[in-house]
Structures are given as structure tokens and as C-alpha cells.
Image (spheres, rainbow, N blue to C red):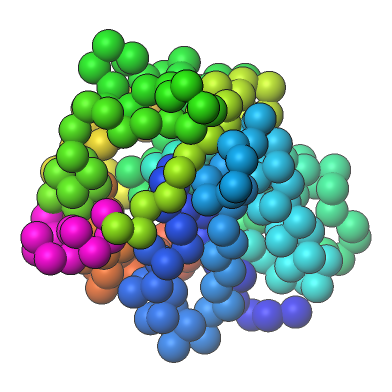
Amino acid sequence: MSSTPTLLFVHGAWHSPACWSKVTSQLQHQGYRCLAPQLEFCGTEEPVESLAGSISQVQELIASETAQGNNVVLVNHSFGGCVGSSSVKGFTRKDPSKLSPGSGKVAGIIQLCAFTPPSKTALYDIINLDTSFHHSGPDGWELIDNGEPTDLFYNDLSAEDAQLWKGQLLKHSTASLKDRESVYAGWADVPVWYLLCTWDQAIPIQIQEMMVAAARDAGADFTTRSFDTSHSPYLSKPNDTTEFILEALGDFKAKSSRS
């Protein structure tokens, strides 16, 4: 059993775990165990047909860590919010149905400009397809066809760095974005810290604020902070993002000790 929670990083659409490295290296240096799996909704040879497999990937890691007595905190980015939040079902104090006596639990969720859908709500139910920067392709992959990735994701990085990260983008399954049945509003079961990114061109700040307001209206425990950053704060402001995560962890620990 560790005295610090295991941090489970859930990347977003078209991305890989490499995007987390500037943040996870700092947290590992401070003694935190960091897990960042490559999720099957992108980067596979063939597009997956649902979100269920990606959720199972995360749940397997949660199950392993909690079985060892370790608490877990999910750190979700963008579309990773749909996966990470869905994955906590049964692993929380509110719903411990998948936990054994003496095991750890999911202590909180950290959302970095991340989607926060209600249960049984697909990403395609949230976005406006008329103005969206991405649409379904003919071969099961989601196409970025209405905007330049360097502007959408990395508009506060240098041109050189933006091109570097653009070159690492992966193909993404359209079906995972349309899957309603797999989605669970786990953000209602644990405290959440949400990082609002004001320069975000992929999920505009108004959409982020709308999702936070809806979650609060549903009774969820949300704390927010705002950064003047793009959609990728872990790249453009890794030190500030790390401090945000540490502040959230301190709050989760305090709330857990009081409950």
C-alpha cells in the first residue's frame, strides 16, 4: 500500500501517452506512481467498434492498483474524459461494487479541458456536427477535416514544436465517438478538479464552462482553475499543469480523510 495515490493518465483522441511525459516525469520525481496506457480507440490497425475496450483497459489498471491497497486518481484529457470517468464505476466510495474489503479506491478525477458527458451520452451527442473540426470518414476513422491540428491543439506552442506533435497524431475510431452505451458519469461519484483552458480551439472555453455548470447542476463536486493555454496545457505549461494536479491531490486527500 502506497501513501500516495497512483495517477492514471487517460489521453485524448488522436493522441498517445507520449503527450503526458513532461508532466509525469515531474510527478514521478516527487514519488508518484504514474500509469499512462495507450488506449485502443486510436492507433490500432483497424478501428474499434465501441468505447468498451478502452474503458476495460483503464478498469484493469484501476483494479490492479486498488487490489494492492492503493488509491487511484484519474487524470483525463479531452476525449479521455469520457473514458476515464466511465472507468471509475464500481471503484469509488459511493459505489464500491468492484472493490474488496481493505482495497484502495478511486479518490478523485482531474479533468484537463476534458469532455464530461452524462451517462449514456456519446461525444457525437455533445458536439455540433455543423461546426465540428472532425467528421466520420468512409473507412471507420474520424477525419480532422475542418481545421489545422497545429491550430486546434497546439496554438500556444512554437511552430516547430506544434509540427512535431502533429506528426505524432494517430488515427482515431469514429465508432468510439458514437458509443452511448459504454459511457458512465463517474464524475458524479468522486470529487473533480477541472482545468479550464481559455485559448482552447478544440473544445472552446464556453463548452468547457457549460459542461462544468451542467455537472454542478447535477450535484457533482467540481473545483475549477483557469489557465491561458491551448488544448494541450501539459505541453505548453507543464510546470503549471503539474502544480494544478498536486493542488487537486491535496484536496482529494483532505476530503478523503474527512469522509
Q: Residue at x 74, y 67 (%)?
A: 65
Q: Residue furthest top?
A: 130
Q: Quadrant of residue 257?
A: bottom right
165 falls in the magenta region:
yes
Image x and y of residue 233, in percent:
26, 57
Res. 177 visible in picture = no
210 falls in the magenta region:
no
Q: Quadrant of residue 151?
A: top left
Q: Main secondary structure of the magenta part?
A: helix
In the rendered image, the quadrant that contains the C terminus is: bottom right
Query: Does 81 sit left or right of 44 as displayed?
Result: left
58 and 219: which one is in front?
58
Q: Residue at x 32, y 15 (%)?
A: 128
8, above or below 154, in the image: below
Image x and y of residue 176, in percent:
57, 31
Image x and y of residue 40, in percent:
61, 48
In the rendered image, the quadrant that contains the N terminus is: bottom right
Query: Does 219 sit left or right of 66 as displayed?
Result: left
134, above or below 30, in the image: above
Q: Residue at x 19, y 33 (%)?
A: 147
Query: Does 171 sit left or right of 145 as displayed?
Result: right
Query: Does 221 sit left or right of 41 as displayed?
Result: left
Res. 135 visible in picture = yes
106, above or below 202, in the image: below
Q: Quadrant of residue 119?
A: top right
Image x and y of residue 153, in percent:
24, 47
Q: Residue furthest right?
A: 101
Residue stretch rendered in magenta on the structure: 156-166
Q: Residue at x 33, y 14 (%)?
A: 129
17 and 44: which one is in front?
44
